[in-house]
Amino acid sequence: MFVNRRKVHIEWGDCDPAGIVFYPRYFAMFDASTMALFEAVGWPKKSLMKKFNFRGWPMVDTRAKFAIPSAFGDDIVIETTISEFRRSSFDIAHKAWRGTDLAIEAWETRVWTGPHPDDPERIKSAPIPAEIVRALSGTPEPEAA
């Protein structure tokens, strides 16, 4: 699977009174890392919305394992990859590195959505397009016959 890496500088506003990253801020960083993963393979969210009538990928499950804290002024590198695709959901793995030390591992399950057929203001799970799965799996496009 394709792995995207992005550097994140820990800002003052990311930290709690103890001077370390307030844990919900990591989840915001991971959300941005998911977006960056799709962008890195050529699929920014705006393009997904236009081509596939995509509405979003809400999170339905998440967990994290915190190994070492990060503090104001630290730089971390977040590695993000899709670990599994299903029909309309996918699992994401994030690893946040502070230097050579693994600071956090996090896992999410998200659902690919489109408009609900009975009410376009609502969302409903939808099959993940094959070209998206191929792009994030590192599988080449099928050749034309």
Image (cartoon, rainbow, N blue to C red):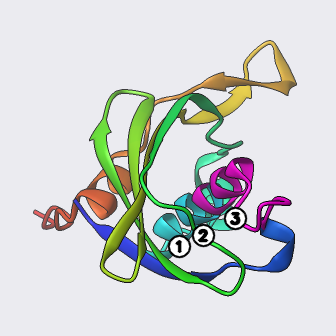
User: Which residue is depicted at the point 86% across and 71% down?
Assistant: 13
The 10 Å Cα crowd at callout 1, few under 14, some 14 to 19, many 20 or more, is some
Q: Nearer the viewer, residue 128 or 71?
A: 71
Q: Identify the residue under disc 3.
A: 20
Q: Position of residue 131 (x, y in %)?
A: 34, 55
Tell me the SS state at disc 3: loop
Q: Identify the residue under disc 1.
A: 39
Which of the two discs, 1 and 3, labels the residue nearer the N terminus? Answer: 3
User: Which residue is depicted at the point 68% across and 49% down?
Assistant: 23
Q: Position of residue 84 (x, y in %)?
A: 28, 39
Q: Nearer the viewer, residue 144 or 33?
A: 33
- Contact between marks 2 and 3 (CB within 8 A): the answer is no
Residue type highlighted by circle 3:
Ile
- Contact between marks 1 and 2 (CB within 8 A): the answer is yes
Q: Nearer the viewer, residue 35 or 69?
A: 69
Q: What range of the chain is rendered magenta?
A: 15-30
Distance in Å between CA atoms under marks 1 and 2: 4 Å
